[in-house]
Amino acid sequence: MGNDTQTYVSKGTVIQVVTISFYRFDTLFSRLWAFTMMGFARIAFARMSEVSFWKLCGSGTEEGFTPRPNTAVYAILCVWPNQEAAERIMLEAAIFSSYRRVSNENWTIFLGTTSVRGEWSGMSPFHAEHAFNGGPIAALTRATIKPSILMKFWGRVPAISNVIGSNKDVMFKIGIGEVPFFQQITFSIWPDTQSMAAFARHEGPHARAIQAVREGLWFQEELYARFNVIRTTGSWNGNDPLNNSELL
């Protein structure tokens, strides 16, 4: 599933594991293929009995934090009963093999949920069964935006994107979503909890947006989760983004 592998905790866990796989498609043919698979791949995932929850996602331009679609980057999120099942099926299943074959580059992160609140599509898909291991920490936020505040929400996004884009602590960040404009997922990886908390609490566009969300009830549904980074496979932009930090 990729040439380079980085492991942060021992293998063999028997508790739930979440994976997020990112795929880059550079050619016109591969981009058309990826777009059509947003519909056709649902059949394959619906038949995977060991996947308790899955989402096919597109991305936006400028690292994903805009409503303008990026036809080159797609993501697949899956929830597995354990790490062994995740590794085995992602290696053997035809749908994952097809994505790896057609894409020009792919990168998968294996995650263990340490905290979660909220719902996603009326469900609670993540189980906080992992204790924080002190390594890199991933943060995922997902929201369904109320139609009445779409313009107000997306009007704040460019300023937030600029702030997180210039933050030297963030190791990886991307915005993805199931439905353009209305459903937004932000995913980021930080070297530790302190750097992530410092960004969230720092006075600026991000903090003001959080306050506005709380005061204005912008979302119909929202979920916030934190994860240990268990393992990564593949590459992104030619390397593993988590190998670039001296903190690992």
Image (spheres, grey):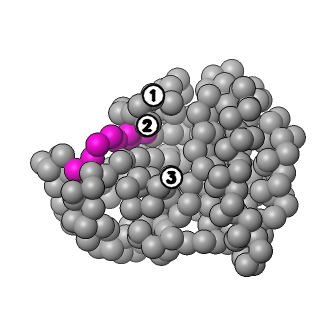
Magenta region includes residue 147: no
Residue drawn at 83 percent across, 41 percent down: 93
Front residue of 172 and 45: 45
- Graded by Cα atoms within 10 Å as few (under 14), some (14 to 19) or many (20 or more), the crowding at tag 2 reads some
> As rendered, which of 114 and 102 lies closer to the eye?
102
Q: Residue lying furthest left in this view? A: 215
Q: Residues within 10 Å of mark 3 (few under 14, many from 20)?
A: some
Kindly indicate the quadrant of the structure image that contains residue 12: top right
Which residue of the protein is positioned furthest toward the top in this rendering? 14
Q: Quadrant of residue 147?
A: bottom left
Label 2 with label 1: CB-CB less than 8 Å: yes
Instruction: Determine whether 189 is above or below 224 in the image.
Output: below
Judged left or right of residue 195, residue 212 is left
User: Residue 124 shows which numbered tag?
Assistant: 1
Count the labels in the image.
3
Q: Give how far across and how far down residue 150 sits, in percent.
A: 27, 61
In this rendering, the answer to whether 23 lies above or below 140 is below
The residue at 67%/31% (across/down) is 51
The residue tagged with tag 1: helix, strand or loop? loop
The disc placed on residue 6 is: none
Q: Amino acid at mark 3?
A: Glu
- Secondary structure, mark 2, is loop
Instruction: Say the numbered circle drawn on residue 120.
Output: 2
Which residue is under mark 3?
178
Residues under labels 2 and 1: Cα distance?
Answer: 6 Å
Mark closest to the chain's N terminus, 3 or 1: 1
Q: Is residue 114 visible?
A: yes
Residue bounds of the magenta highlight: 218-225
The alpha-carbon separation of the residues under discs 3 and 2 comes to 11 Å
| Residue at disc 3, secondary structure | loop
Q: Is residue 121 left or right of residue 101?
A: left
Q: Residue at x 31, y 52 (%)?
A: 145
